[in-house]
Image (cartoon, grey):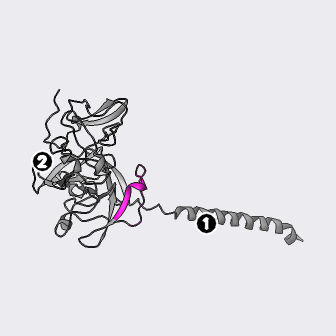
Amino acid sequence: MKLRQNLPLAIAGIAVMFAAWSCKKDNNSKSTTSTAPANTIQLAVNTKFGSVMTDDKGKTLYFFAIDANGTSGCSGGCTTAWPTFYQPNLTLDKGLDAKDFGTITRASDGAKQTTYKGWPLYYFSGDAKAGDTNGDGLESIWFVAKPDYTVMVTNSQLLGVDNVNYDHLLKPGNEVTQYITDDRGQTLYSFSHDKSKTNTFTVPDFSNNKVWPIDTVKTVLNVPSILDKTQFAIITVFGKSQLSYKGWPLYYFGQDNNTRGSNKGIAFPKPGIWPYTNSSSPVAPN
């Protein structure tokens, strides 16, 4: 009889022990939760350059000015100093848009390479650790990859609408010339008849804008390190914004057909009327 009276107490004790064991098990299961892997392309804040693109280990990525046409101009020994970046399964930090990324197959070696806004991405062998940016500005053609360049530069052969090659003096000849493009490698031109921060070409109804469309950037964010950001400004043309450089309003050429690396406008209607711009361009006259 005494055993029957103590049975409920025994059962209650077992229930308490079971509950304590269950809580301990739940607590242990929570402690084994793993963290998510790092994004394959990240945005790092650099004291000199601001927001810079890196890989998942924080190694800096770069653009090559020769690549404005969307293909890689780095091959052979170049890739020893500048290894290519490729990641088939991209995961991105906040502030990056998947639509801006792509993949090319390199003509030189058949390997794949990831691109951003059409620019193939590279590492620099001289960067020893995460956060290094030792490759920026080298030979004035290598630049840290940033998501917020307002303009870029390219080093390319000038090929006019007349299908003639031109040198940097806009004389017939074969030569690689550096000039300013937009952030996606499309050539920007000045108009020789313009005045400082004054567009003299575009008409009020924009009926001639298809011939020489204005660059309607509204804010100057960042530029490659070999250019002076203070020489860029935004002007207003009949209610629309237009980017200017050294006082020169900047335009696209309609017959370039929004094609990366095309620079046909340098010879239309003849060389010198619509020249390219670069760090050596004169300041626009008042």
Q: Position of residue 191 (x, y in %)?
A: 21, 37
Mark 2 residue type: Leu
Q: Farthest right residue? A: 1
Left of 17 or right of it: where is 269? left
Considering the numbered disc 2 on the image, is that residue within a helix, a strand or a loop? loop
Per the picture, the main secondary structure of the magenta-coloured stretch is loop
In 3D space, how far apart are the residues under numbered discs 2 and 1 (Cα atoms)?
78 Å
Identify the image quadrant of residue 199: top left
Identify the image quadrant of residue 47: top left
Considering the numbered disc 1 on the image, is that residue within a helix, a strand or a loop? helix
Report which residue position mark 2 lands on: 170
Specify the quadrant that holds the C terminus: top left
Residue 154 can be seen, yes or no: yes
Q: Residues within 10 Å of mark 2 (few under 14, many from 20)?
A: some
Highlighted magenta segment, given as a residue range: 88-103
Mark 1 residue type: Lys
Report which residue position mark 1 lands on: 25
What residue is drawn where x is 19% and y is 35%? 246
Check the image and report above or below for 162 versus 73: above
Identify the image quadrant of residue 64: bottom left
Mark in the foreground, 2 or 1: 2
Foreground of the two, 140 or 190: 190
Residue 224 counted in the magenta span:
no
